[in-house]
Amino acid sequence: LERILFACPDAVTSPRTWSWVGISLEARRAWQDIMARLYSLAMADTLDEEEGPLPVFRVFADQARPAWEHWYAQHQEGRAELPEAMHACHAKMESYCARLSLLVELLWYAAGEPFDPTSGPDVSAAAVECGALLVRYFLSHARRAHGCLELTPTDRRIDSAVAWIAKRGGAVARRDILKHKVAGVKTYSAADRLLEELADRSLGTITTERNT
């Protein structure tokens, strides 16, 4: 669920009437032209023999970095207001904000002039602000969706594991999880699956330490 961008708009309460007016031919052609330009953007010159062309990476423009840092700080502060069941969704929004900001920037570039398919823009502060607005929208609608859902047994296991780890400072060893039978874990393989699930939900990271 944390990978889904929910949209749950308010129900229409006013009377609905039929309209023969749809999306204009001009608007459809303009959108097709933008998509064609996006598809024409060049990939990296280096080729991977197995996977083909490599992507071109875009970065935040200098003026966009303070905007991103400001949004990131506010986003982290909002985590405390969410139920634990939504913490994974909240964490996923960090990468979604960057992706949405890039999409907005590229749409602007493809819709404007001049357009050069061999080049491309860095992500601007304005695009970051738009990405932040979109994340705020999707996160608020995720709260609506989560309010309509029941926790699954896996969700409850994850919540109990997160709470247990938090009480121990936020870092534990696999053997500790097995020793205390966290979330019903009884084997090392089950402990590994639990840790992988936590990492997959962006609720932590797995590190390997070797004794010297």
Image (spheres, rainbow, N blue to C red):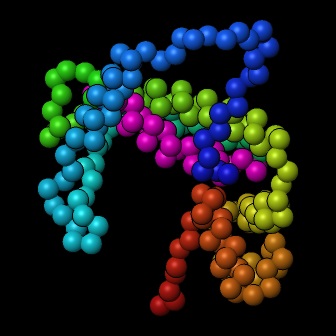
| Residue 153, percent from left and from top | 84, 64
Q: Main secondary structure of the magenta part?
A: helix
Judging depth in this view, the residue of 38 and 57 nearest the camera is 38
Residue at the (19%, 21%) spot, across then down: 113
Quarter of the rendering containing residue 24? top left
Residue at the (33%, 22%) spot, across then down: 30
| Residue 171, percent from left and from top | 65, 67
**Left or right position of 139 against 42:** right
Judging depth in this view, the residue of 78 and 92 nearest the camera is 92
Looking at this view, name the residue that lies furthest to the front: 20
| Residue 92, percent from left and from top | 57, 49
| Residue 194, percent from left and from top | 70, 73
Quarter of the rendering containing residue 167? bottom right
**Left or right position of 149 against 92:** right
Residue 209 vertical placement versus 54 (above, below): below
Looking at this view, name the residue that lies furthest to the bottom: 212
Q: In the image, is residue 154 part of the stretch drawn in magenta? A: no
Quarter of the rendering containing residue 60? top left
Residue 211 vertical placement versus 207 (above, below): below
How many labels were placed on the picture? 0
Residue at the (16%, 23%) spot, across then down: 114
Q: What range is drawn magenta here?
A: 84-109
Judging depth in this view, the residue of 91 and 74 nearest the camera is 91
Judging depth in this view, the residue of 66 and 142 nearest the camera is 142
Q: In the image, is residue 104 part of the stretch drawn in magenta? A: yes
